[in-house]
């Protein structure tokens, strides 16, 4: 009756072993014999799903957003690389990375940033490109996937530069056939390099250790 169900519910959150009838009402009694265990498991499960979702989707979405804004407006908002870096910090407690491994991730980002800063000083790369490339490198760490990411960025960046130069040289011809392109892309003196960075990231990121580990742990 109602009294027995109420008593069983109380016992469900307590530490007493279940009676046969209570065990029938609550078949998971042995696993969730008290509320701290129940909510502890739910908390860990929620943290795992949040970690996996962030690792798998946030970096690609940020890179794609940076590429789109650079194409349309010829600039990358600072909030994109900042958000990318903050999300990396947020997932660290769930990543299982050791302090030396975290240090290598930070070192990778710093090395890439120093290189990009030198290119920025030579007027080869924009400041926004340097920031998004450095923030993305933080997610790769110092390993083969980072090298793959940078190689693809350089290769695709060269192709992008040639394509943009050809577009600008033939802008009037595209206009006559009704093909509309962002005016900022046609008149600006810089190359929207975030397009190459975003494409390279989408190619290389699935092989990064964080993604591989997240996929394996979800199986």
Image (cartoon, grey):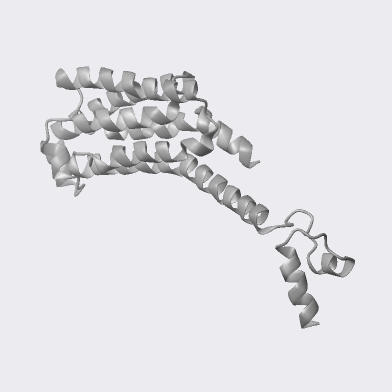
Farthest-out residue, right? 20
Is 22 located above or below residue 29 in the figure?
below
Q: Is residue 36 left or right of residue 27?
A: left
Q: How many numbered circles are shown? A: 0
Name the quadrant containing residue 66. top left
Q: Where residue 8 sits: x, y (%)?
A: 77, 70
Is 156 located above or below residue 219 in the figure?
above
Q: Is residue 184 left or right of residue 53?
A: left
Q: Where residue 16 sits: x, y (%)?
A: 79, 60
**What's the residue at 78%, 65% (across, down)?**
26
Is 39 located above or below residue 182 in the figure?
below
Q: Is residue 8 left or right of residue 213?
A: right
Tell me the quadrant of the picture where the N terminus can be found. Answer: bottom right
**What's the residue at 77%, 76% (across, down)?**
5
Name the quadrant containing residue 11. bottom right
Is residue 19 something that shows in the picture? yes
Q: Nearer the viewer, residue 149 or 47?
A: 47
**What's the residue at 59%, 47% (across, down)?**
44
Is 4 located above or below residue 19 in the figure?
below
**What's the residue at 30%, 35% (across, down)?**
195
Q: Where residue 175 sits: x, y (%)?
A: 15, 45
Is residue 200 something that shows in the picture? no
Name the quadrant containing residue 63. top left
Q: Nearer the viewer, residue 15 or 141?
A: 15
Tell me the quadrant of the picture where the C terminus can be found. Answer: top right
Q: Nearer the viewer, residue 106 or 64?
A: 106
Q: Where residue 53 sits: x, y (%)?
A: 50, 46
């Amino acid at each position: 009756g109602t009294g027995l169900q109420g008593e069983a519910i109380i016992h469900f959150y307590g530490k007493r072993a279940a009676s046969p009838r209570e065990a029938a009402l609550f078949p998971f009694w042995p696993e969730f014999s008290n509320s701290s265990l129940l909510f502890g498991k739910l908390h860990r499960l929620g943290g795992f799903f949040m970690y996996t979702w962030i690792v798998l989707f946030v970096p690609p979405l940020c890179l794609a957003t940076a590429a789109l804004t650079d194409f349309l407006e010829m600039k990358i908002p600072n909030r994109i690389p900042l958000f990318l870096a903050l999300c990396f910090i947020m997932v660290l407690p769930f990543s299982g990375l050791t302090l030396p491994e975290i240090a290598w991730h930070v070192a990778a980002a710093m090395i890439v940033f120093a290189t990009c800063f030198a290119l920025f000083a030579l007027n080869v790369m924009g400041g926004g490109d340097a920031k998004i490339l450095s923030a993305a490198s933080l997610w790769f760490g110092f390993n083969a996937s980072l090298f793959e990411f940078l190689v693809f960025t350089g290769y695709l960046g060269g192709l992008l530069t040639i394509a943009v130069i050809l577009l600008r040289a033939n802008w009037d011809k595209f206009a006559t056939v009704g093909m509309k392109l962002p005016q900022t892309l046609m008149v600006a003196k810089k190359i929207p390099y975030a397009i190459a960075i975003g494409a390279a990231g989408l190619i290389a990121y699935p092989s990064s250790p964080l993604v591989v580990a997240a996929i394996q742990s979800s199986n």
